[in-house]
Image (cartoon, helix red, strand yellow):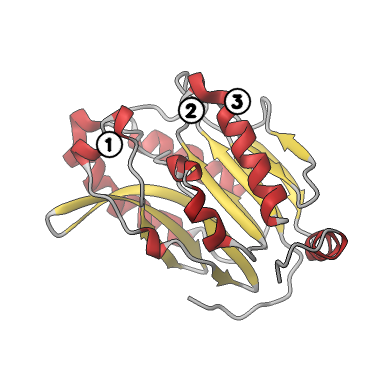
Amino acid sequence: MMMTSKKGDYKLYSLLFETKVGEYDTNLRTLLHLISKTPKNSLIVAPEVCLSGFDYENYDAVLAFSHKANKALKEVSDGKIIILTMLERRGDEVFNFAKIFHNGAVVFERAKAKLFRFGDEHKYMSEGSGDEIQIVTVDGIKIGVFICFELRFKEFWQRLEGCDVIAVPSWWGVLRTEHFRIFTEALAVMNQCYVVASDSQNAECTGLSGIIRPHGEVERNGAKAILEYSFDRKEITVMRRYMDVGIG
């Protein structure tokens, strides 16, 4: 979905916080509080399923809560681009939807195309289509989204060639921490763009939220709930001219 650019000076934000399983209102308050600390013209990426976790024991409650969460996030998205994932039912199926909120609306959504079978995701939700992985332009910024496990599939990487920013909301297992570090950094270098990764601070996850620049410079959140970096389109242009590999 195309949106008209206002040519504002955007800042990028990766979030890092713990999701309290079963405490959906608490998680939403945490997220809204962090969003409130960002100015207009912010692009914000939150962890995968950060409002609920994979709370399969209370699945109906998780799915019901998505309606409240959607309403609240639309209300705080004026002048901001907010990216995260949420579990939602569509018809008889449940999907893990990546969503982009902007100016009071959901301007893009798609279902997770590769489910993590080690975590039994396939037992509780349906898989989306890789064909829906695409570049979407929001307020003049070309954005792509990979949802966690999708990072491992090389056929998806080229679909996002030409992005200005690739968002990676994740719930990535701590046992594979180095894999997440390598994939997110390689993604920025390969696509010569910004990567804004947001992983959960829960004990089973890497906590490696961070922002990687087009030249490959890396900054991770560390202990920061919010990491900020100014979006500069010139960084992308300079890198693509310096190392011309055919990305327009």
Q: Which mark is residue 178?
A: 3
* In this picture, residue 247 sits left or right of residue 167: right
User: Which mark is in front, 1 or 3?
Assistant: 3
**Element type where label 3 sits in the image:** helix
Dot 1, crowdedness within 10 Å: few (<14), some or many (≥20)? some
Q: Say whether disc 1 or disc 2 marks the residue closer to the N-terminus.
A: 2
Which residue has dot 1 on it?
A: 121
In the image, farthest residue toward the left: 92
* In this picture, residue 212 sits left or right of residue 76: right
Q: Position of residue 55 (x, y in %)?
A: 27, 31
Three-letter amino acid code at the position of disc 2: Glu
Instruction: Relative to 233, say whether 36 is above or below.
Output: above
Three-letter amino acid code at the position of disc 3: Glu
Dot 3, crowdedness within 10 Å: few (<14), some or many (≥20)? few
Q: Position of residue 86 (x, y in %)?
A: 36, 48
**Element type where label 1 sits in the image:** helix
- Asked where in the image residue 132 lies, by quadrant, the reply is bottom left
Dot 2, crowdedness within 10 Å: few (<14), some or many (≥20)? some
Q: Position of residue 120 (x, y in %)?
A: 26, 31
**Element type where label 2 sits in the image:** loop
Q: Residue at x 36, y 52 (%)?
A: 113
Which residue has dot 2 on it?
A: 18
Gap in Å between the C-alphas at discs 1 and 3?
A: 22 Å
Residue 40 visible, this angle? yes
Q: Which mark is residue 82?
A: none
